[in-house]
Amino acid sequence: MTSSPEGVDRLLERFASSPLAPIARKVAGKERLSFEDGLALFATRDLHGLFALANFDRERRHGNAGYYNVNRYLNPTNLCWVDCGLCAWARRPGVEGGYTMAVEEAVSEAASGWHDGVTELHIVGGLHPTLPYSYYVDLMSALRSRFPGVHLKAWTMVELDWIARVGKKTVAEAIADLKAAGMDSCPGGGAEIFEKRVRNVICANKITGEEWLQIARECHRQGVKTNVTMLYGSVETAADRVDHLVRIREMQDETGGFLGFIPLAFHPEGTQFPHLLAAGGLEDLRVIAVSRLMLDNLDHVKAYWVQIGEKLAEVALQTGADDLVGTVTEETITHAAGARTETGLSRLQMEKLIRDSGREPFERDAFYERVVRDPDGRVLRANRHDFTATGRIAAPPAGLPSHSSEIDPAIASS
């Protein structure tokens, strides 16, 4: 998408007498913002101006589209030895509430919530102290066999590091094995804030920010795209946030491997930091807007409605975000930390939310191509895969075109 000259002129006129005028000129001219610009955007009191700049850039890239996908979350285990201060979800071995699914259980769980024709499985868990390396490879293979056209977005950089350690392999070897077994891309969790001072407080036992980036670099080298996140609202400063965004931007310059960026709002309830106050709505929108403006080489900035709420997510689509992540059936991690949102939305609910924001819903697959459905809502094509297989589709209502292909019922149901 490109902006008309008239749109640029209106933008510059809007900021003619504003302290943000130098930044507005850079945005209009598609010039890269500096570290100091990022600090200025986090400090500005002109939130209307900030949001206008971010929305200008967002619409220049994506027009009026509001992206989402129909995905399901799968968390095979919540047992984890790391004990991060920021986490309310994971359990130490032997602690009440811990669980681990066998491979067959995990596949069954993945197939249990397919009412809207899921096109992506989002798979993350804890750093389990005793599961063997084969578990992770076998799970990918089993899911790929059961759901051949569904995109498997599996394992954060933190998990890939642990899986490699368990298998006594290099990270490169582990990524290659998991990719061969069915792993299509990786989620962006565990990035938190790259700054060591912050990580020493909120996730001291995790890999470093530098290690996170190095593992992402290896994924990208092997053709495995990843997302990337930033956890905000704990003990970081504005400078820590800008540093995090600049490091992401530098990595994207190098590899081009990040699919999207997701700002994650810290939920303190149930963590080791219950005294901290959660970020307010305007701060949520500020982070999204600044991220859109700083990440000039990354196409998609997402508003995670599970964390910031459905109503604020609608506003976010007008302040820099272009993607609402997905239907996220059965989300548990943020809800363990006190989220009051739904644990998942239907496809129709998601499209209503996007339309209510003034945007046009665009159901995407993992490649940001439009998902093709039949008139009854069954998936016909997604992830560059034609869905055919095990059960005939019921005849469509009178007057609608018929389809003679067969579709896996786990994918097809609407």
Image (tube, rainbow, N blue to C red):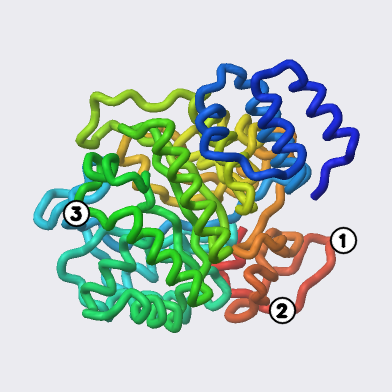
Q: Secondary structure at mark 1?
A: loop
Residue that appears at 25% across and 54% down: 206
Q: Quadrant of the C terminus?
A: bottom right
Instruction: Give the residue at the far left of this rendering.
Output: 94
Residue that appears at 71% across and 40% down: 57
Inter-mark Cα distance, 3 to 1: 58 Å
Decide which of tag 1 and tag 2 comes sooner along the chain: 1
Inter-mark Cα distance, 1 to 2: 18 Å
Q: Is label 1 or label 2 in front?
A: 2
Query: Taking 15 as reference, is 187 above or below it?
Result: below
Location of residue 108 (image quadrant): bottom left
Location of residue 139 (image quadrant): bottom left
Query: From the viewer's perspective, is 385 left or right of 186?
Result: right
Residue of label 2: 405
Residue of label 1: 399
Query: Taking 333 as reference, is 375 above or below it?
Result: below
Query: From the viewer's perspective, is 114 left or right of 270?
Result: right
Decide which of tag 2 and tag 3 comes sooner along the chain: 3
Give x and y (percent) for residue 15: 74, 22
Query: From the viewer's perspective, is 186 left or right of 361?
Result: left
Pointer 2 local density, CA inside 10 Å: few below 14, some 14–19, many at least 20: some
Residue of label 3: 82
Query: In the depicted view, which residue is nearer to us: 16 or 181?
Result: 16
Does the residue at mark 2 contact the one at mark 3 (Cβ under 8 Å)?
no
Instruction: Inspect the image, locate mark 3, and give the three-letter code of the amino acid beneath it.
Output: Val
Decide which of tag 3 and tag 1 comes sooner along the chain: 3
Q: How many marks?
A: 3
Q: Secondary structure at mark 2?
A: loop
Find residue 6 and name its label: none
